[in-house]
Image (cartoon, rainbow, N blue to C red):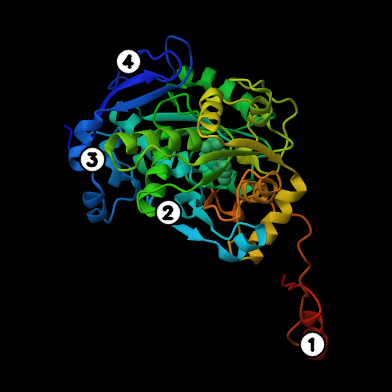
Amino acid sequence: MNDTGSTLTHLEGALSGERYPADELIGLDPTDGRPLLARYDIEKAARTLTAESLSGRRTGGLWRWAELLPVRNRNHIVYLGEGDMPLLAQPRLGEALGVPRLSTKAEGLNPTGSFKARGMAVAVSRALELGVTSFVAPSAGNAAGALAAYGAAAGAEVTVLTPVDATLANQQEVLAMGARLVLVRGLISDCGKISTALAPRIGAFDVSTLKEPYRVEGKKTMGFELAEQHGWKLPDVIVYPTGGGTGLVGMWKAFDELEALGLIGSERPRMVSVQSDGCAPIVRAFEAGERFAEPWQDAHTRASGIRVPSAVGDFLILDSLRESGGTALSVSEDSISEMQKFAGRMGAGYVSPESAAALAAVPELRNRSEIDPDEEIVVFDCGIGQKYPPPQDLPEPPVVDPADFDIDALAHNLRYSGMHIE
Ligand SMILES: *Cc1c(COP(=O)(O)O)cnc(C)c1O
């Protein structure tokens, strides 16, 4: 029964262009092992998906965009509150970074504290619809937390593989939600190989980034929301911390769908991928003019969500950067730590290291004249900082014994330390 209004018609090989039936469980393109993308009957969707009808849909988070999502039957939707995240003006931070019209898309407010919830909500719901009851995925941490949450809500079995040094908070949330966790002495790419090999042996469906077609459908809703929140226009520049690139690829797809619906015109933002100096395969490929990225050796960065040495969707990321007139750049580990604290002091909240990396790229983009001071810049704040080890050099707080302390000394200490206001 199709009671959601989904207009999903077929799957298409992102590289091969081959067409496959939509209602079969397929992971990668059988022709070339590359990603598959979902295609819709946009003309049909346009009859009900209008600016007006959307403004009347007040609940449902990202599921408000049902016509352009793959789930056909409402009973299969696993909803935990994902989507409809605010776009927050950041005038103080923007002023300090030389771009007063800076906003952040506050994705850390999603269930499980990151935008991984969007992708997993849609991938898990659609897989349930196609009969899946067990899931497996590699993850740097946040995807594991999200899959554990949606799997549990669906009553499905979940197995996740993360690097042994994955953030402790992510490991704990996965275990607390009853998922099975395997720690791998290696990187996410090693976890990915084990996940693919394990899937058929434990009867699980592999929901690795872009190795099935629907996580990207969840993430593309960020592009829909951005247009809607912006009065059906798009900002000049989107800055996105890039690991597997699902969000970037998803938004790029979303803009084409919105244009086909007649909701936006042909203008596009310049898309900017940000990575860390310790793992920058997309930046290297962009600069070398390559369409595919070589795997990065000895990848390291505290921003674990972007510690992705090789991405299956590399060509999709690179194509969108180039078509949009955007760019790719990497930032130092020190600048990530510094920006976590600076953004916090400027009122942007306690952002994840990945979000800090994206923000840290903004002054560099200004230096390179890649952005003008009067342009509208949206930086993706992808997750909360609370799940990660803290940034370097946080001040040491004073400890006070209420039965015996010197009020004058404490007042003096507070006056002359800690709070520095720029
Ligand atoms: C996964 C993740 C990213 C990278 O997102 P992709 O769409 O996979 O490139 C960035 N930040 C955080 C917090 C993440 O969890």
Task: Please state which of the two labelled residues, at mark 3 or mark 1, is closer to the viewer.
Answer: 3
Q: Would you say the residues marked 4 and 2 are in contact, meaning their CB atoms lie under 8 Å apart?
A: no
Q: Is residue 158 left or right of residue 53?
A: right
Report how far apart the C-alphas of labels 1 and 4 lie in the structure.
Answer: 74 Å
Q: Nearer the viewer, mark 4 or mark 3?
A: 4
Q: Amino acid at mark 3?
A: Arg
Kind of residue sitting beneath label 1? Asp
> Which comes sooner in the sequence, label 3 or label 1?
3
Going from the N terminus, do you reach mark 4 or mark 3 first? 4
Give the foreground label among 1 and 2.
Answer: 2
Q: Is residue 377 visible?
A: yes
For marks 1 and 4, the one nearer the N-term is 4
Q: Nearer the viewer, residue 255 or 394?
A: 255
Q: Which mark is residue 85?
A: 2
In the image, residue 21 lies at what x, y percent?
Answer: 29, 17
| Place of residue 357 in the rendered image (x, y in percent of width and height, measured from the top left) | 65, 47
* Residue 20 image label: 4
Q: Which residue is mark 1?
A: 404
Quadrant of the image occupied by residue 192: top right
Verify CB contact (< 8 Å) between mark 3 and mark 1. no
N-terminal-most mark, 1 or 2: 2
Q: Residue at x 68, y 23 (%)?
A: 288
Q: Secondary structure at mark 4?
A: strand
Q: Nearer the viewer, residue 49 or 403?
A: 49
